[in-house]
Structures are given as C-alpha cells and as structure tokens.
C-alpha cells in the first residue's frame, strides 16, 4: 500500500492506477472501524484499484463541536487499510486541502437544510466542499458512502449530479455492533452507562419498524413510537420519517419508501442512526 500526503502526488497516482482499471474511492475521517472496512470491500466489487482517504475536515465541524478531540491514529488506520487490501491511502494535511486564501465553497439547497443540516449549520457545506475537492483530485471513480450518514449520501449524490462530476456514487449498508449500535468513530467517547443508553437509537428504529410491520402507517404514530424508545438519551435532536429519496416529510401516512432518521445526544456525544421502515436491513 502506498501512503500519500500531497494532492499532486495523489492525483498522478490515481491517473496511473486508472490506466490499469477503474478506481474505487472511500473517503473517511479516520479512526477506522469495521464500518469503514466494509466500504473498502464493497468498492472492490466495482473497481480493481482501491483508494482511501483519511482527513479530519475542519470545515464540517461547528465551533462547539469535537474537532480538537476527534480521534486521530494514522498508524492504526494504515494497518486497517493495508489489511483491507487498499492500494493507496491519501492522508493530506489541512493546508493541502485548503490552500491559503481558499474561498470557494459547495453549497447544496433544501436537501441539506433539514435534519442534520438544521442542527449543524455549515456542516454539509464543509462536507460537500471537501468531498468535491477529493473528487477533483482523484478523477473519475466509483465512490462508496455509508448509509450510516444517510443525508450525507443523498446530498453527495445531488452534488455529483448537479456538478456533472465523473463519479459513480454507491451507498453501503450500515455495519452494527452485535447489540445493534451502529459503528461510529465517536462510539469511543461512550463509557459504560452512556454506551448502554446509546442502544436507544437502534431500539427506536426497531420499534418503529415493528409498528410498520403490524400495519401502522400514520407518520405521527411511527415517530412517536421511536421517540418513546429514545427517552434514555440526554436530548433528542430529531426522530423524523422522511421519503428515502427526497428526504421530504410525509403529511399523514407513509409508504414503502419511508425512512426513519434519528439524531440524539448521549452525554456530550452526538449519535445518528437510520433505517428504511420497509427494508430495515437488521
Ligand atoms: P466518517 O469517517 O465517519 O466520516 O465516515 C466515512 C464513511 O464511512 C462515510 O461514508 C460513512 O457513512 C461510512 N460509515 C461510517 N460508519 C459506518 C457504518 N457503521 N456502517 C457503514 N458505513 C459507515
């Protein structure tokens, strides 16, 4: 595996790889876990070359968020990438991705305004800007994004379509711990009791899916079922059922495209989770 730190080296490396076959791209912020590794394996189905990035992107963190304490461990990340068969790991410094004087941003419309966008002002602008930069540096590729960050997946699909980028976006299923907790780099912030309370997210998803399976279609009832399970969390940002493609809310009753998205805080840790009500995947 080649470890690269500079944009121009990354660009020429990807160009060379593409001469041998398609390039698959997995973007991460590091502190890698099995969820990230599943993306590396999935992208291999589409591409003979797998490229991964590790970059804690400062512009997607709000002023009171966890940028400073976000876990960074390039040695651990390199090992996981190597074990997963990654060909190139790109780990740039901040000034590589944001040259001095940078003032260009990528902003998506309504799709990025609700849900996490409403609670994290500027978050998706930071995400879309850095992801577009990675796409520009990598060139034509298949890029896999986890459904764990479902709104992000939909927003990136929009960016690629709107900006005519030569990228095929593929969504990957959520990888969970055996007890149901969705894997996340932020799970390491969770100690004993908070780790237990974090299970309320997957329990809320399951409760709402069960109600849906019993035939319940009223959006207010399905959301209320989820919210009741979220009582152990310290605060609820949202538990919203939206259309899985448009992320628009339903008026009264849901259909087969309905997706429940949740964001809560447990202690000071912000956790998100989601699933389709008709095809929950767990
Ligand atoms: P992050 O490092 O948290 O920015 O995530 C990098 C990529 O990994 C994103 O596409 C995430 O959606 C994806 N990802 C993170 N956790 C999981 C998980 N538990 N299952 C599947 N994909 C994940």
Image (cartoon, grey):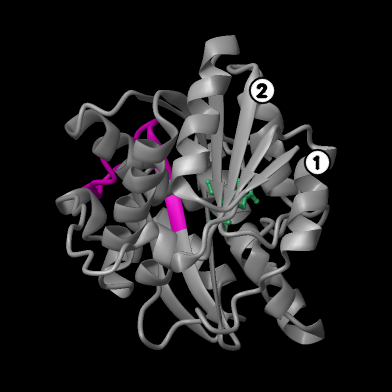
The count of marks equals 2
Q: Secondary structure at mark 2?
A: helix
The residues tagged by marks 1 and 2 sit, at their Cα atoms, a distance apart of 14 Å
Badge 1 density bin: few <14, some 14–19, many ≥20, Cα 10 Å: some
Ligand 1 within 8 Å of the CB at mark 1: no
Return the disc, 1 or 2, that comes first in the chain's sequence: 2
The stretch of residues the image draws in magenta is 245-261
Q: Quadrant of the N terminus?
A: top right
Ligand 1 within 8 Å of the CB at mark 2: no
Q: Position of residue 120 (x, y in %)?
A: 33, 72
Q: Identify residue for label 2.
A: 44
Asked if one can make out residue 25 in the rendered structure from this viewpoint, the answer is yes
Q: Secondary structure at mark 1?
A: helix
**Depth check: 13 or 79 in front?**
13
Badge 2 density bin: few <14, some 14–19, many ≥20, Cα 10 Å: many
Asked if one can make out residue 216 in the rendered structure from this viewpoint, the answer is no
**Depth check: 196 or 271 in front?**
271
In this rendering, the answer to whether 22 lies above or below 53 is above
**Residue 114 falls in image quadrant:** bottom left
Specify whether residue 255 is painted magenta: yes
Q: For the stretch drawn in magenta, what is the main secondary structure? A: loop
* Residue at (68, 40) in percent of width and height: 282
Q: Identify residue for label 1.
A: 82
């Amino acid at each position: 595996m080649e470890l690269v730190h500079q944009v121009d080296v990354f660009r020429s490396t990807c160009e060379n790889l593409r001469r041998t076959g398609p390039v698959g791209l997995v973007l991460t912020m590091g502190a890698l876990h099995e969820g990230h590794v599943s993306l590396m394996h999935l992208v291999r189905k589409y591409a003979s070359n797998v490229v991964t990035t590790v970059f804690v992107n400062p512009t997607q963190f709000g002023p009171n968020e966890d940028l400073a304490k976000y876990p960074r461990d390039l040695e651990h990340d390199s090992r996981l990438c190597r074990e997963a068969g990654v060909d190139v790991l790109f780990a740039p410094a901040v000034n590589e991705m944001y040259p001095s004087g940078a003032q260009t941003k990528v902003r998506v419309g309504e799709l990025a305004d609700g849900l996490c966008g409403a609670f994290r002002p500027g978050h998706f602008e930071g995400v879309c800007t850095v992801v577009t930069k990675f796409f520009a540096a990598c060139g034509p590729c298949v890029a896999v994004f986890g459904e764990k960050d479902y709104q992000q997946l939909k927003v990136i699909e929009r960016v690629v379509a709107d900006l005519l980028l030569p990228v095929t976006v593929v969504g990957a299923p959520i990888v969970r711990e055996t007890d149901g907790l969705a894997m996340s780099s932020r799970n390491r912030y969770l100690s004993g009791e908070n780790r237990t309370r974090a299970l309320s997210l997957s329990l809320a998803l399951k409760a709402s899916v069960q109600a849906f399976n019993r035939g319940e279609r009223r959006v207010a009832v399905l959301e209320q079922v989820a919210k009741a399970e979220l009582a152990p969390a310290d605060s609820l940002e949202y538990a919203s059922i939206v259309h899985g493609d448009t992320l628009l809310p339903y008026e009264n009753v849901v259909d087969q495209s309905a997706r429940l998205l949740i964001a809560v805080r447990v202690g000071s840790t912000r956790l998100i989770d989601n699933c389709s009500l008709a095809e929950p995947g767990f």
